[in-house]
Image (cartoon, grey):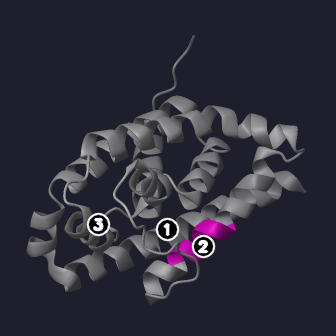
Amino acid sequence: MEFHFNFREIATASMVLFAVIDILGSIPIIIGLRNKVGHIHSEKASIVAAVIMVSFLFVGEEILKLIGIDVNSFAVAGAFVIFFLAIEMILGISLYRDDEPESASIVPIAFPLIAGAGTMTAILSLRAEYFVENIIVAIIVNIIFVYLVLKSSKKIEKVLGKAGLSVIRKVFGVILLAISVKLFASNINQLF
């Protein structure tokens, strides 16, 4: 078995997942959950989210084949979803978001907050362009970051403040917008 590790692919995939997961933008929700129910199990939430993402990386394509959709078509559709997520982040509007979860169990934190619809779409869109091993490394990098953010969310909120979180969210929104355009352009040619 031959591995194709590529730092550029890992960095790009990591940035895409970082922007889509938007764990820094989710800090207010995480703080609210901590205040409501006390302790959030950062380790469990991180591990479950990683398992969901890696599983979807391998099984997601098979699910698409089962319903007759090729990866490039899904990548183009995913580019639209990522585009709208980027618009949300840049403009500070809410096009689609679930209501704030009522408990701090694995379900609202690991799924859909960390490994939600946008993350699944991004993973399959990345799968159309990058080697699987690079995406797995990107997932691991993001899960480590998610874990650190979950563990120290109160400190991060104090350091960055609302204005800092807003700036970070907008910057990653612009990066995500550019990535969605690239995904669209590279996959639309392969469809026709």
Q: Residue 154's image quarter? A: bottom left
Which contiguous range is marked in magenta? 80-86
* Of the two numbered discs 3 and 1 in the rendering, the one whose residue sits closer to the viewer: 3
Main secondary structure found in the magenta portion: helix
| Residue type marked 2 | Phe
In three-dimensional space, the C-alpha distance between marks 1 and 2, rounded to whole angstroms, equals 7 Å
Q: Secondary structure at mark 1?
A: helix
Residue at mark 3 to residue at mark 1: CA–CA distance = 27 Å
Q: CA distance from mark 2 to mark 3?
A: 28 Å
Disc 2 packing (10 Å; few <14; some 14–19; many ≥20) = many
Q: Position of residue 6 (x, y in %)?
A: 45, 34
Q: State yes or no: discs 3 and 1 in contact (Cβ < 8 Å).
A: no
Q: Is residue 152 left or right of residue 115?
A: left
Q: Where is mark 3, residue-wise?
A: 33
- Sequence order check, earlier mark of 1 and 2: 2
At mark 3, the secondary structure is helix
Q: Position of residue 160 (x, y in %)?
A: 15, 75
For label 3, count other residues whose C-alpha is less than 10 Å away and answer few (under 14), some (14-19) or many (20+). many
Asked if one can make out residue 118 in the rendered structure from this viewpoint, the answer is: yes
- Nearer to me, 12 or 150: 150
